[in-house]
Image: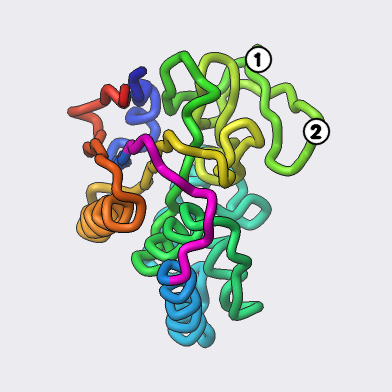
Amino acid sequence: MKFFVSDDVFKKLPEVCFALIAAKGIDNKNINDDIKSILDNQISKTHEYFKDKNIKEYNNIACYREAFQILNINPNKFMCSIEALVSRVVKKNSLPSINSIVDLVNIISLKYTLPMGAHDILPFSDDICIRFSKDSDIFSPIGEDEVEYMPSDELVYASSNHILTRRWIWRQSEIDKITEKSSSILFPIDGFKNKNYAELLKAKDELESNIKKYFNVETISTILDKDNREFDISL
């Protein structure tokens, strides 16, 4: 299985880049107390740091809002995942503990203020890509039963005609969500070479190190950009 980025993506967002980590053999059945404790600590730090700030104007969030506008996505109506995550922490000073993989991703996402994902890749046999949607695409929103039929020209994560995330980094689908049964997982981190590349590299390395540490599995990883658009994620 390959992961690739369509040429058209870089025509719209020339500086966009993606850190990818893939791992298999993960045992996600039990909540790891160390990860839960680190998450609670990171939530407190994030709340304290952002509580008196304008989140929309923070550099590592503003760059995604600007990209959304280029993509004709209203960032006020559809907040990117990291803006939504930080906003929730600032408002409630808490996050639910979903499972250890999701908790770990949330830790690193909050620490580096980066949109990060985790996708169960077992349901898919076709390649996964970032591209613009087509009229034949379908989306099953996370937590819902009904299928949505996609409009064309929306930036998405996709496999065949199944959409994994709508509006690029806004909302994930039900079919690839991480559960306690997920064992083969793809972790993407979305950033920009000219905005937050240093943070993206640190986040990638820290997440990969922690996956190995807490789940005792091997990983493969890479960085994709306009000069390197494809990666074999077969495990």
The answer to which of 74 and 141 lies nearer the viewer is 141
Q: Which residue is mark 2?
A: 145
Is residue 26 magenta-colored?
A: yes
Is residue 62 magenta-colored?
A: no
- Residue 135's disc number: 1
114 up-or-down from 10: above or below = below
Task: Identify residue type, mark 1.
Answer: Asp
What is the spatial separation of the Cα atoms under label 2 and label 1, in whole angstroms? 20 Å
Q: Which residue is painted at 38% across and 37% down in the image?
A: 25
Residue 18: % across, % down: 31, 40
Span colored in magenta: 22-33
The answer to which of 12 and 28 lies nearer the viewer is 28
Residue 150: % across, % down: 68, 24
The answer to which of 140 and 35 lies nearer the viewer is 35
- Seen in the image, is 87 located left or right of residue 225? right
Q: Which of labels 2 and 1 is toward the front? A: 2
From the image, give the main secondary structure of the stretch colored magenta.
Answer: loop
